[in-house]
Amino acid sequence: MTHLDLPPLRRAAGVVRLPGSKSISNRTLLLAALAEGDTDIHDLLDSDDTRVMLAGLRQLGIGIQHIGADSYRIGGAGGAFPVKEAALFLGNAGTAFRPLTAALALSGGHYRLSGVPRMHERPIGDLVDGLRQIGAVVDYLEHEGYPPLALKPAAVRLSAPIRVRGDVSSQFLTALLMALPLTGERAVIEMTTELISKPYIEITLNLMARFGVNVERQGWERFVIPAGQRYRSPGAIHVEGDASSASYFLAAGAIGGGPVRVEGVGRDSIQGDVAFAAALEAMGARIEMGANWIEASAPTGGRLRAFDLDLNHIPDAAMTLAVAALFADGPCTLRNIASWRVKETDRIAAMATELRKVGATVDEGVDFIRVGPPASLTPGAAIATYDDHRMAMCLSLAALGGVPVRILDPGCVAKTFPDYFERYAEVTAPVIAIDGPSASGKGTVAARVAATLGYHMLDSGALYRLTALAARKAGVAWDDEAGVAALAATLAAEFEGERILLAGEEATEAIRSEEMGVGASKVAALPAVRAALLDRQRAYRRWPGLVADGRDMGSVVFPWAECKVFLTASAPARAERRYKQLIAKGMPANIDLLLQDLRERDARDSARSVAPLQKCAEAELLDTSDLSIEQAVAAVLGWARDRIH
Ligand code: DC
């Protein structure tokens, strides 16, 4: 795709489960490969940068099994890599290139490491100098100080401390720290400059410790790895959500009202980028935090405040602050961010150019950027992304200024967050929630409202009906909570226009029977079934908007929906409508039995312990007993137009 047009966005609220952390994923993969024993890694990030690392490790002879959706079993080599000759292509993945350079330099083989052209412009001299000090043989194949590299076997000596710079990239220190235990000897690293991005070193030390290697850290100047330590598998390890990826959603909540909640990082995180939440708080955003989640909302009754901050410790998440600055009440200064210049692109130059396109006044220097917010954002900017995932994700936030924004080459987000834009839509697309009892006409009204507005449509009742049908087909009883929930979690449902398929088979008519209606209402009363269908329902929220119909759209699934309607009709009116529908289809029907059935179903749907059918306080009540469909549709459209925009 050459570009993605984001619609004007005005509100952000919702929940996002974060993809795994890139920094933790790639470090854990390497440590597991060097360790004794098998390691099961769960919730590994699936992205370009982790695929590069996985492919590299496979080439180096590491056994890797895919044991579940995001789970891998890594057969540790118990030391240096078994394959002694290889040429690795590592794309633009710094988190693979630097640590593999160090580990391979100490692996006693012949290796060549290369990447995309931008990787060959990113400096690596400080790391190579460090490795050469201990006798490693590392040659530059093109330009002095830059990849590609050739590594050869060498006798290493660790008698003297290794002296390295820490002011270009903290990844050089990370690479040395992770590789040196391969020697089994005592190793000392001394920094010759100030160390940048310190929290990333904490991630490294934390993960090394989980694999049984402890490093003595003396301030941020000296690191000692005692002799005789070996990496040992901890058995299983769970990768936290990516705190840098969290920054886009938290900023969206702070700009677009909120609350936006990210799940996967929180107070217990080992990632420094959670400090981003504190920076947003300094801008006046309201932040709440749990062990494994963070939630951000806009300041009460005001704009975000301007800031002047040293952001050396969170260089990646700091980019998000540069875009949040568009919504501040004055110019914002981001200081001590020189490392931006040697990342995926020169991020200071790129950010300045693109922020100007949306109307900001920008000053830049060697190691700072100052962003003056415009009175209103310039609509229709075409944002270049420089093959830099973070440029694309950051600038997508500009659309929250209520202007359309075009993102060029949006696919570059695959480096760390392949489905970023789908997740972003799930917190920003407007939602109209239409709840009500069976046969109230909400399905018909919802479909017409969606068609009029060009919105997507979620018929949540169909998901419960499909679950009941799947259970019937699998011979699972409707009251077997665990059994039905397992089916719901992997329900192979497809909606193709009017047609509904289950596991590829036609189910459109089958799920509409009275029997499946009863079955749906029974399985819908089971909490585990509702939980299993929650994320799937939320995933229907897409641009330009969603109309969702059901029982708990406004109360549970989309509690932040802009427009909520509770659509009802008297039981006799509903029974009569259902009766007419059945007769029209040439099916047998008895109005008294239908009425009795409806009353029983209402009672079950309203009395259940989870997500009972009831009108939420803020929903508009629409009694359609005496209304035509056209009148009901007009009423909902009227409310929608008032509330959205
Ligand atoms: O709207 P419908 O008749 O297709 O719904 C079938 C059953 O599914 C209904 O009796 C209750 C349940 N349901 C639910 O509990 N929550 C929803 N959001 C939608 C339907």
Image (spheres, rainbow, N blue to C red):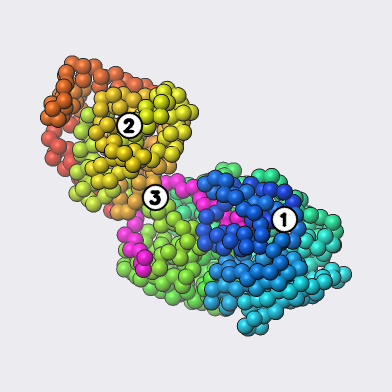
Instruction: For the residues labelled 2 and 1, say whether their Cβ atoms are less than 8 Å apart.
Output: no
- Who comes first in sequence, dot 2 or dot 1? 1
Instruction: Judge whether residue 605 is colored magenta.
Output: no
Question: Could you say where residue 359 lies in the image, as x and y percent from the top left?
Answer: 37, 71
Closer to the observer: label 3 or label 1?
1
- Nearer to us of marks 2 and 1 is 1
Q: Secondary structure at mark 3?
A: helix
> Is residue 539 rendered to the left or right of residue 37?
left
Residue 188: x and y, percent? 82, 66
Left or right, 460 with respect to 447, comes to right
- The N terminus: image quadrant: bottom left
Q: Report which residue position mark 2 lands on.
A: 465
Closer to the camera in the image, 126 or 57 = 57
Q: Which residue is mark 1?
A: 77
- Element type where label 1 sits in the image: loop
Q: Which residue is mark 3?
A: 426
Q: How far apart are the two marked residues, 2 and 1, measured between alpha carbons?
A: 50 Å
Residue stretch in magenta: 1-28
